[in-house]
Image (spheres, rainbow, N blue to C red):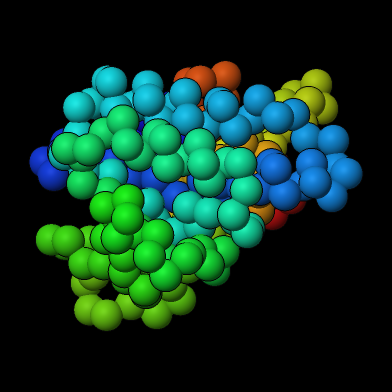
């Protein structure tokens, strides 16, 4: 796991991330919602940081790489993609990924409509409620966050990685994407992301914060 809200799968030399939502910031600003424009730059800076640190062979986007119609942020992505011609890039489509017909072929991105199986892992944008045998699903979509409270009534929600018995849910990589407070079950593992650091969450704290 990386504090930039992605995973580096060392054995496969692959970066895994979900819910970048390219175009969302420009979409909201066009609608008059005051969202900082530099959030888009932050997304690409973090992508560059990860690639510089890991030198991957592949980047796998687990859905919602894009958010809305073509806008300035799409152009930023296209320029960014051209910086890494030797890196294989794949996308498992999410519910926001309405791509032009020739987009992926023009920019050398392989597309998978529903899921991609690599070794023991099934990559799918939407979390699963049922599983095929002993498969382990890696998904996104819900933008998981964990709600934490302190002894002095401090309260904060922060993005997190969630690992259950047969499924992991990746945090939203994109800036300004919101989040859904997940329910933690016994034996689940949750890693919070805050201030560019990773923090394992103790189940006792997580249950208390969710009012269980």
In percent of width and height, residue 54 lies at: 23, 26
The answer to whether residue 14 is above or below residue 128 is above
The answer to whether residue 77 is above or below residue 44 is below
Q: What is the quadrant of the N terminus in the image?
A: top left
Residue at the (66%, 25%) spot, across then down: 38
Is 52 or 102 nearer to us in this picture?
102
Q: How many marks?
A: 0
Examine the rendering and report whether any part of residue 79 can be seen. yes
Residue 149: image quadrant is top right
Residue at the (20%, 34%) spot, across then down: 56
In percent of width and height, residue 10 lies at: 16, 36
Is 146 or 139 nearer to us in this picture?
139
Left or right of 74, for residue 24: right
Residue at the (48%, 52%) spot, across then down: 65
Residue 209: image quadrant is top right
Q: What is the quadrant of the C terminus in the image?
A: bottom right
Is 27 or 194 nearer to us in this picture?
27
Examine the rendering and report whether any part of residue 185 can be seen. no
In percent of width and height, residue 114 lies at: 37, 74
The answer to whether residue 122 is above or below residue 77 is below
Left or right of 122, for residue 120: left
Residue at the (47%, 24%) spot, across then down: 45
Left or right of 73, for residue 53: left
Residue 148: image quadrant is top right
In percent of width and height, residue 32 lies at: 88, 44
């Amino acid at each position: 796991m990386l504090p930039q809200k992605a995973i580096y799968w060392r054995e496969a030399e692959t970066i895994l991330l979900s819910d970048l939502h390219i175009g969302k910031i420009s979409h909201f600003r066009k609608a008059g919602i005051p969202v900082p424009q530099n959030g888009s730059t932050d997304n690409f800076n973090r992508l560059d940081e990860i690639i510089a640190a890991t030198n991957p062979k592949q980047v796998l986007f687990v859905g919602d790489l894009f958010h809305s119609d073509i806008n300035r942020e799409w152009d930023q992505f296209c320029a960014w993609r051209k910086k890494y011609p030797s890196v294989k890039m794949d996308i498992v489509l999410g519910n926001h990924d309405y791509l032009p017909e020739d987009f992926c072929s023009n920019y050398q991105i392989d597309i998978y409509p529903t899921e991609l199986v690599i070794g023991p892992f099934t990559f799918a944008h939407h979390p699963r409620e049922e599983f095929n045998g002993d498969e382990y699903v890696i998904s996104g979509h819900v933008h998981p966050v964990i709600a934490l409270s302190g002894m002095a009534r401090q309260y904060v929600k922060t993005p997190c990685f969630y690992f259950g018995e047969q499924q992991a849910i990746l945090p939203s990589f994109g800036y300004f994407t919101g989040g859904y407070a997940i329910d933690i079950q016994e034996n689940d593992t949750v890693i919070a992301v805050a201030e560019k650091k990773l923090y394992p969450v103790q189940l006792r704290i997580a249950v208390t914060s969710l009012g269980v």
